[in-house]
Amino acid sequence: MNGMVLRCPHIMGTTHSRPERAMHKTTKLTPVMRKEVYRRWKKGDISLRALGSAYHVDKKVIQRIIVRGAVGDFSVHTSANARYQKPAPGTKKRPRSPIRRAKKDKNASS
C-alpha cells in the first residue's frame, strides 16, 4: 500500500498519498488536502470561497480547516457532539453543579 497513489478528482493534475488510517467513506478532504488548503490560504493568493469551490466543499468547512490548521491539526474529526458520546472507561461521572446540588438539598430538607 505504500506505493499506491490516490488521484484526487477535485484537484486536477495533483496526486496525494493514501492515508495510513481508514477514513469515513464520505470524508471530502484528506489530511494532505487539508494541509494544502491551509498552505494556499496562508499564502494569501486565494479566498475562502474560491478554495471551497476548488475542493467542492462549503466555505464553513474551509474556515474550520483554517482554524484547526493554525494549531497544526489537519486530522479528520468526527461530527458527533462530545456530550452525547459515552464517557471513557474508568472515568467518574461528572459531578453536579453547586446550584443544582443546593436545590436538591433544599428540596430534600423540606
Image (cartoon, rainbow, N blue to C red):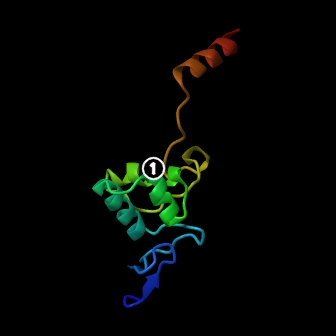
Q: Is residue 75 visible?
A: yes
> Residue 51 appears at what percent x and percent y?
45, 59
> Residue 37 appears at what percent x and percent y?
39, 61
Which one is nearer the viewer's eye here, 68 or 92? 68
Q: Is residue 88 visible?
A: no
> Residue 18 appears at what percent x and percent y?
43, 80
Q: Is residue 40 above or below residue 5?
A: above
Q: Quadrant of the C terminus?
A: top right
Q: Is residue 45 above or below residue 6?
A: above
Q: Is residue 36 above or below residue 87?
A: below
List the residue tagged with mark 1: 63
| Mark 1 residue crowding within 10 angstroms, few (<14) / some (14–19) / many (20+) | some
> Residue 64 appears at what percent x and percent y?
46, 50
Residue projecting furthest to the top: 110
Which one is nearer the viewer's eye here, 16 or 84? 16
Residue type pointed to by label 1: Gln
Apparent side of residue 70 relative to residue 22 in the rendered image (left or right):
left
Q: Secondary structure at mark 1?
A: helix
Apparent side of residue 16 relative to residue 60 in the rendered image (left or right):
left
Residue in view at x 51 percent, y 43 percent: 92
Residue projecting furthest to the left: 43
Residue in view at x 52 percent, y 49 percent: 60
Residue in view at x 32 percent, y 61 percent: 39
Q: Quadrant of the N terminus?
A: bottom left
Which one is nearer the viewer's eye here, 94 or 58? 58
- The image shows a total of numbered marks equal to 1
Residue in view at x 57 percent, y 54 percent: 79
